[in-house]
Each structure stands twice: as C-alpha cells, then as structure tokens.
Amino acid sequence: MSDSTDSRAIALGANRWITDSRVYNLVWLGRWIERAQTIARVVRWAARQDLDWGSQGLETVLGMAASIRGVNVGPGDTALEMMLTRDSSASLRGCLVAARFNATHVAPVEVIRVIGAAIELMDAQGPPITTPEGVGDLMDRVLPTLEELHATIEEAWFHSAPLSEEEVYRRFVQQQQQ
C-alpha cells in the first residue's frame, strides 16, 4: 500500500478518493433531509386534516405520528411541540440541525445556507403555533425551502456540466476550511 492511499478510503478512480468519514456524513445528510421532509409533510397533512375533522384535533393525529416515530409525549408537552421544535432527532428542527452538522463536513456552502434558512424559518415563528392554520402556513413555508435544498444539492453535486480543475480545487479548499 502506498503512502498516499488511506486504508479507510473508497476509490472513485485514479487519484480520487473519499474517506469513510465523508461517506458517513453524506449518508446522514441525506437521511436527515429525508426525515425533515417527512415530518414536515406529516405535520402539514395533519394540520389540513384538523381543519376538516374539527374536534378530532391536530394534537391527536400528531400524537399518533410521534408514537410511530418512538417519541413519548410526556405531561406538559404537546405532540406538536415534540414534532416541530424539540432538539431531538424526532423533531423537524432537530433533523435540520443534524443535517446542517453533517453538511458542514461535506457540503458546499450553498447547501449549508439553505439548511440554515429552513432552521431560521422554524426559529422565526415566534410564540409556539397551536392552530392548524398557523401550523399549515409554517409548513407551507418550510417545505419549499426543503425543495430548494434538493435543487441546491442537484446543482452543487450533480449538474451535467463537467467541473473545471479550478472549480474542483475551489470546492476542495472550501470544504477543508469548514
């Protein structure tokens, strides 16, 4: 084995490699983004159903969703709070924070910026939202940001034009500085 080869690296081609820590961060970045979108869609759906069901309640539907995710809603907590704002892997905000953490290790600045914008949307809501209309409106603002995130990832990593050597170097340096 030569000195320039990391034994924990995955070969991508001649003189190109990605370490297992980068693979780990890429995989978890994708998983956290997927989880965040799923939670946002479930919460938006529940808010819309609450408008139709009336007394059935947003809290009941979200309580079931929280239970499915393995979250126990304790006394003094609401399922809505647990699904949206708690800093746990079961909440929308928690998933976004975890995605941002993984992104800082592997993603271009553009991706990190969009994740940060989604977190800011969650934080800028002010007092806790409890009405189905307010929850639906918040999710209607968050979900397009998550769609923008997918477009940013597509543009940053999977665009069809080949990167110039200068651009490859710029991105490498940018990632090393993070």
Image: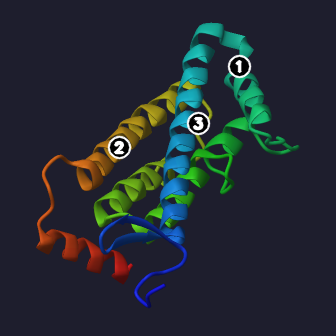
Mark 2 or mark 3, which has the lower sequence index?
3
Please give the name of the residue rendered at 43% of the width and 55% of the height, measured from the top-left corner. 120
Tell me which amino acid carries mark 2.
His
Q: Is residue 135 above or below residue 97?
A: above
SS category of the residue bearing label 3: helix
Which residue was labeled with disc 1?
57
Residue 145 location (% of width, % of height): 36, 43
The residue wearing badge 3 is 39
Q: Nearer the viewer, mark 3 or mark 1?
A: 3
Q: Is residue 126 visible?
A: no
The picture places residue 136, in percent across and down from the top left corner, at 50, 28
- Dot 2 lies on which element? helix
In-image side of 84 versus 63 (left or right):
left
Q: Which residue is mark 2?
A: 150
- Any mark on residue 134, and which? none
> Which amino acid does the dot numbered 1 rest on?
Gly
How packed mark 1 is, by other alpha carbons closer than 10 Å (few <14, some 14-19, many 20 or more), is some
Question: Which quadrant holds residue 157?
Answer: bottom left
Question: Which element type, helix, strand or loop, lies under badge 1?
Answer: loop
Residue sitting at x 42%, y 69%: 18
**Label 2 neighbourhood size at 10 Å, few (<14), some (14-19), many (20+)?**
some
The residue at the point 56 percent across, 34 percent down is 38
Q: Residue furthest right?
A: 75
Q: Nearer the viewer, residue 40 or 57?
A: 40
Q: Disc 3 vs disc 1: Cβ atoms closer than 8 Å?
A: no
The picture quadrant where one finds residue 114 is: bottom left
What amino acid is at disc 3? Ile
* Sequence-wise first label, 3 or 1: 3
Can you give x and y, in whole percent of width and height, for residue 17 in the image? Answer: 39, 70
Which quadrant is the C terminus positioned in? bottom left
